[in-house]
Amino acid sequence: MPAPVLYRKWRPQTLAQVVGQEHVTRTLLNALTAGKLAHAYLFTGPRGTGKTSTARILAKAINCQTSGHGEPCGECPMCLSIADGRAMDIVEIDAASNNSVDDVRELRERVGTSPAEARYRVYIIDEVHMLSKAAFNALLKTLEEPPPHVIFVLATTEVHGLPATILSRCQRYDFHRIPQQALATHLAHICQAEGLEFDPEALDLIARTAAGGARDAVSLLEQVEVAYGGNVTLAGAQEMLGITGDPRAVALIQSVAQRDLATGFQIIQHVRDDGVALPQFAKEIAAHLRNIMLIKAEVPGAIEVPAELASELNTLAKAMPLDVITAALKLFGQLDFRADAASSLSLELALVDAVTPAAAPAAPASYAPPSSVQRGVREPASASPAPSSARQAPTPLPEARASTRPPEGASQPPPQPLTRAAAPRPEPVDPPPPSRPAAAPSPVPAGGHSIDDVRDIIRQLQIPNDKFIGPLIKSKYCTVQKVDGGTITLGFTSSFKAHKDRLDQDANRRLVEQAIKAACGVDYRLRVILVDNVSDGPNETPNGASPSDGSSPRGGHLVRAALN
């Protein structure tokens, strides 16, 4: 007969043996000691935290032939039969496979019969949220007023799936995820009892991977023990769990902190060439960034990692601003490799966005340019307000020694002396004819959309079942160069030639063309080219001004006027 698996062998048999649920076991023990039993209990919480085991212990405790109150003895015939699953009066029902109203009606018929050998008949309904609505309705009356010899214990991982009428009829106990340290201590106790050699770091890794579930932790421990002949080592646990523990994850974060894009690309290339699972590598990066964020926030006892790794993370936390940490965590923590788990493109794009500083934000609405007094010119006292579409007349540059022409619609102020004695006085000039536009709009091609329109279309573009091309064309490294008739030209800088080639593939180009057609109704063709710099294309300027409209905040219109 095969030996029982570890998680069944080490299933708790008393309330004191339940790990990490002291708030539940203490309350139940006090109720058992005082003889204050409820007719229906609801155990809810994550999987593997002891809900069903506690229900069985409760059934043993209320039917124990030796104590009758408090902990079960575990030695009387009733305790032994319940532990072995032979007790006729302890009925376990899997609601996932017995969820119909007919199953509940059959249960109601059996509830009325007296127990065969136990003091109470206990019905343990596991995954009770799987019952149908009709089944819940059929159970309501029985659950509210069961016979005095019947106790219901409902267990679920999704308490929100239960009707309020069921919740109100039960005494609810919430099971929590088991703390990592408590879980590692429990695993060490099992290893010592089983005579296994173990590394404490391996147990910490297993406990962290189990995410607070005792059953998962013990199962993982047994897998590592079987694979490595009774030795539970850190290297063995990492290999068995598919966790690389790769120091290159920390090195990649260092490249982000130092804004070293080349080193980051080399690390990703080496990781990919070594056959490391890129989704798992991205998870490690995100886990390290989370720990760095918690260290930066000075959360006491927030991380549980080896001392050497903790020292490296502390150094990175001191070197990285909090906004850089959180931005990188969002980028690496939300990567989706479902389309192609072997492709490093998602990881590379996340690295580029994390390393490259974000574009300078547009000036806020409350921003006002320096007044003419601050620039050295007194404002005329009787100047009439300019129309909303006109700009304020620019002041002359002292170095240019030339007069300027005010834009269309601006009132003609009388000449005023400069505050600097050596500077010349500006000459008044007649305004241009009203028919001349203040700024030349973007040309509208035959397709009916200007470059600005195409930018807006691409910015809101949705490509179904795609995780790469959409973010690629929306990134700041892909610019709209030209809209010529029925062709849209996109440009990439020469350092992103690989991304240009990826987008220029026939299938990917057709995806974008179809998405653009669905968005604007025009069947555009797509052309992808390389440019020397992202500024080679007609990029947007702050506040939506075009580069040629004379509104550059750097004073380009004044320089051009002086040169003229």
Image (cartoon, rainbow, N blue to C red):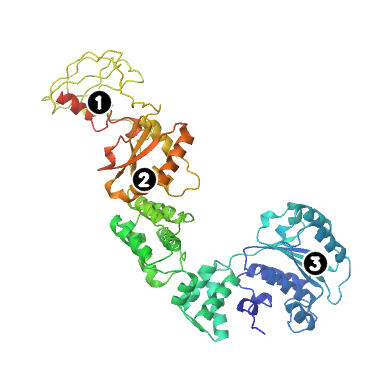
Q: Quadrant of the C terminus?
A: top left
Mark-to-mark CA distance, 3 and 1: 85 Å
**Under tag 1, what secondary structure?**
helix
Q: Nearer the viewer, residue 366 or 306?
A: 306
Instruction: Tell me if I can see residue 292 in this picture.
Output: yes
Identity of the amino acid at label 2? Asp
Identity of the amino acid at label 3? Ile
Q: Nearer the viewer, residue 394 or 109?
A: 109
Please tell me in which quadrant of the rendered image residue 333 appears. bottom left
Please tell me in which quadrant of the rendered image residue 145 appears. bottom right
User: Badge 1 is on which residue?
Assistant: 372
Tell me the number on the disc at residue 173.
Answer: none
Instruction: Tell me if I can see residue 314 in this picture.
Output: no
Tell me the number on the disc at residue 504.
Answer: 2
Identity of the amino acid at label 1? Ser
User: Badge 3 is on which residue?
Assistant: 151
**Under tag 2, what secondary structure?**
loop
Q: Where residue 471 appears, x then y in whole percent?
A: 42, 46
Mark-to-mark CA distance, 3 and 2: 68 Å
| Mark 2 Cα-neighbour bin, 10 Å: few <14, some 14–19, many ≥20 | some
In the displayed structure, 191 sits above or below 540; it is below
In the displayed structure, 434 sits above or below 119; it is above
